[in-house]
Image (cartoon, rainbow, N blue to C red):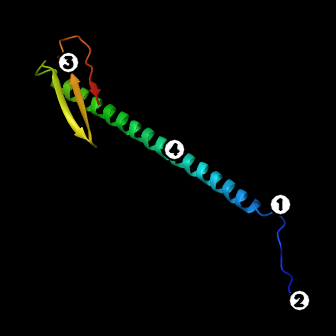
Amino acid sequence: MLRQLRKTDSEQGIVLIIVLIVLMVMAIVSMTIFSQSMSQSKSARAQIDQITAEQLAKGGFWAAFSNTSSSSTAMSTSFPLNGRTFTLSVPSVSSGSNLTATVSY
């Protein structure tokens, strides 16, 4: 009553090939997702560092600007933030010269 299903010689290896193709596609997709994740992480870190440096430069500028009337000495300070060291440098200001603040990291 129950018929026994028999595979022909041409059908025996097809399942293995399909499984291997599916595994390769899954590996490629997962590697692509991992690569994108790492790229986004690096990009976000660079953007955070840029914003931090900009805010330190603005703060250093205004700190030096408020001290220009009382002192014309140069200012240099290092800040350890988030595992990096940011160095703020404001050169001495003479009357009539431009005031610039530089941040390196």
Quadrant in the picture for residue 54: top left
Sort mark 3 into few (<14), some (14-19) or many (20+) by Cα contacts within 10 Å. some
What residue would you read off at disc 4?
35
Q: Earlier in the sequence, mark 4 or mark 1?
A: 1
- Count the marks: how many? 4
Mark closer to the observer (2, 4): 2
Sort mark 1 into few (<14), some (14-19) or many (20+) by Cα contacts within 10 Å. few
Q: Is residue 39 left or right of residue 73?
A: right
Mark closer to the observer (4, 1): 1
Q: Residue at x 85, y 86 (%)?
A: 2
Q: Residue at x 83, y 76 (%)?
A: 5
The N terminus sits in image quarter = bottom right
What residue would you read off at disc 3?
91
Dot 4 lies on which element? helix
Amino acid type at circle 1 is: Ser
What residue would you read off at disc 1?
10
Q: Residue at x 48, y 41 (%)?
A: 39
Dot 3 lies on which element? loop
Dot 1 lies on which element? loop
Sort mark 4 into few (<14), some (14-19) or many (20+) by Cα contacts within 10 Å. few
Check if mark 3's residue and mark 1's residue have beta carbons within 8 Å.
no
Quadrant in the picture for residue 67: top left
Spatial CA span between label 4 and label 1 = 39 Å
Camera-nearest residue between 89 and 46: 46
Amino acid type at circle 2 is: Met
Q: Earlier in the sequence, mark 2 or mark 1?
A: 2
Q: Is residue 74 left or right of residue 50?
A: left
Q: Extreme right residue here?
A: 1
Spatial CA span between label 3 and label 4 = 42 Å
The label shown at residue 1 is 2
Spatial CA span between label 2 and label 4 = 56 Å
